[in-house]
Image (spheres, rainbow, N blue to C red):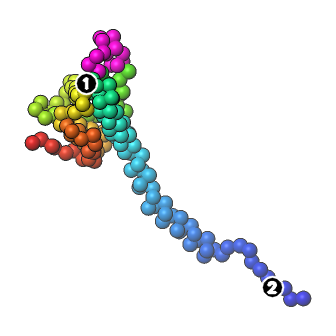
Amino acid sequence: MNRAITSRGFTLIELTVVVFLIGIMLALSIPRFRYALLTDELKSTTRHIVGLVKGLRNEAITEQEAYFFHLDLESRRLWVESENMDEQEREMARERAFTLPDGVTIADVWRRGRGKKAHGKTAIRFSSKGYVEQTAIHLEAEDGREFTLVLEPFLSKVKSYDTYVDIYR
């Protein structure tokens, strides 16, 4: 009997080609993973603020009362108060404030008619109809990346830019 010898393994050339292709795929994808890891805190903070602003508009309309979105640029804290809160409730809101992650700061806040504020505290008012004064919130990361969030008076959508945008008019 003459049996053909069958090989069930891979040749060195086949293994080399597969390892080479895996190397190329890793080389192309690792920079994206690194960028995603580096931008995560800034992007998640941006998403958090956008969600908070949209929720505030809805809450102001639903409850038919004005709300204030407070930003403390020095301590990097954010909190919400309504006009009907008493002093104890306001203090509790300040104590439960959201603190920005390490490496993320509020560069400044610009509001129409009030100008730019880069230090101290500021509050953005949401009317009982959900209106807000035109505002730009500029966030920055310690690695130099910046985001701009623009709140328009009559639009429920918050515009987001991955750079510092001056909207002064």
Specify whether residue 91 is painted magenta: yes
Residue at the (61%, 74%) spot, across then down: 14
Whether residue 76 appears in this view of the structure is no
The quadrant where residue 149 appears: top left
Above or below 24: residue 59: above
Highlighted magenta segment, given as a residue range: 82-95
The quadrant where residue 28 appears: bottom left
Which residue is denoted by mark 2 in the rendering? 4
Residue at the (28%, 16%) spot, across then down: 84
Residue 13 appears left or right of 4: left
Circle 1 crowding by C-alpha within 10 Å: few under 14, some 14–19, many from 20:
many
Residue 10 appears left or right of 140: right
Residue 11, horizontal then vertical, whole percent: 66, 75
Above or below 137: residue 34: below
Tell me the quadrant of the picture where the N terminus can be found: bottom right
In three-dimensional space, the C-alpha distance between marks 2 and 1, rounded to whole angstroms, equals 86 Å
Residue at the (26%, 19%) spot, across then down: 83
Which residue is denoted by mark 1 in the rendering? 66
